[in-house]
Image (spheres, rainbow, N blue to C red):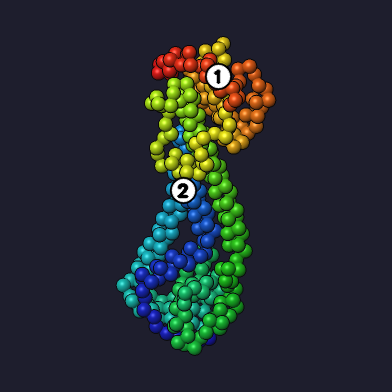
Amino acid sequence: MDLTFQTEYDEDRSARVIGRAWAVRTRGATILSWSMGVAGLIWLFGHVMDVNSEGDLFWCFFLLFYSLFAGLCRRRVVRWYRKIWRTQMGGAKTVNLHLTDDFYECSFGESSSKMPWRTLATSYLFMDGVVVLFLHKSPRLVFDEADLRAGNVNRAEFEAVLRNAGMKSIYELRTRKVGIFLSWLLGLLIILCAVPRVCSAISNRVLDIRTTQVRARLFREVHGATTNCPYVVEASWPSRLVSSFLKTSEPDECLYIFDDEEEEDKVGIFARYGARSYEAYFPCGCACGQQSGYFEHIKELHKPTVFFESEKEKWLEKVRPIAKDLYESEDE
């Protein structure tokens, strides 16, 4: 190969090419930054969905900031190259190139340089009609394949010159392959660490909705269906979203509690929704959720204070005489 030609320097086009080539060369870092961005969005969604979302935004903003910072670093690299090119070119627009099998020579304005291919770069990339040469991770030179073809030098011939000089395609670099693999692995781990935050938030939201429904049911049983109930499911969009996936607001089965010896947990309801159950009590007004199987445990235990659905009237006979006291205690 012995090729001499002129090319017009286009800073904007070179910057676009360098930006894309840098992204391909540092694909592992790009994968990691995108993974952290996705994890940050997942974490933010979990924060918004949670009922008590306090003190957990640090990791969310850290992940999102890292992803944004990685993108800004790429732009900064391109700007840095622009600055170097302007300094080197000194206002010149035309570059004279002389390429042989052994060396690369260029001149522009009053500057000129000549270097063997072996010391010029360590790897190369064919991309979108251009050839980018890298010195380790840094893009070094950009050649337009159209200029090579105009000199009757095809891609295979030019690539043979580069490989004879000891260069490798960046797709063959072991360090890049290992970096991409580790980035995928670490990125997936980071995303998987963020997913439980959403699961926990949705679980807390379901708990809030179900306990509110059970307290409202207990209130209506004690004080009558026509009484204004102070327990209403939150009307926010997270609650509406989660509620749309819940089959019904009516429980599958209920147990009724009356314990005259208790002061806070005197009257209550166990309501089973699927495998899980929820309980609420008056006069304390407290409510909580129980794990799967707890409802069946209470049924089998069948304390004297527990009434089945068939015994609901007996329970109401005990509750109605003290309903006003329960209501007043709840207001306090």
Residue at the far right in the pictured view: 300
Image vertical order of residue 151 relative to residue 134, above or below: below
Corner quadrant of residue 75: bottom left
Local crowd size for mark 2, using a 10 Å CA cut-off: few (<14), some (14–19), many (≥20):
some
Q: Nearer the viewer, mark 1 or mark 2?
A: 1
Residue 99 lies, in percent from the top left, at 49, 82
Residue 179 lies, in percent from the top left, at 58, 58
Which residue occupies 56% across, 79% down? Answer: 159
Mark 1: amino acid: Trp
Which residue occupies 41% across, 63% down? Answer: 78
**Observer-nearest of 247 and 151:** 247
Residue at the far left in the pictured view: 91
Residue on which the image places disc 2: 41
Q: Is residue 128 visible?
A: yes
What number is the disc on residue 315? 1
**Observer-nearest of 218 and 112:** 218
Residue at the far bottom in the pictured view: 152
Corner quadrant of residue 293: top right
Which residue occupies 49% across, 19% down? Answer: 282
**Observer-nearest of 272 and 15:** 272
Q: Is residue 101 visible?
A: no
Q: Secondary structure at mark 2?
A: helix
What number is the disc on residue 159? none
Image vertical order of residue 55 relative to residue 324, above or below: below
Q: Earlier in the sequence, mark 1 or mark 2?
A: 2
Which residue occupies 44% across, 76% down? Answer: 113
Residue 120 lies, in percent from the top left, at 51, 72
Image vertical order of residue 246 relative to residue 324, above or below: below
Mark 2: amino acid: Leu
**Real-space Cα separation, disc 1 to disc 2, in angstroms:** 49 Å
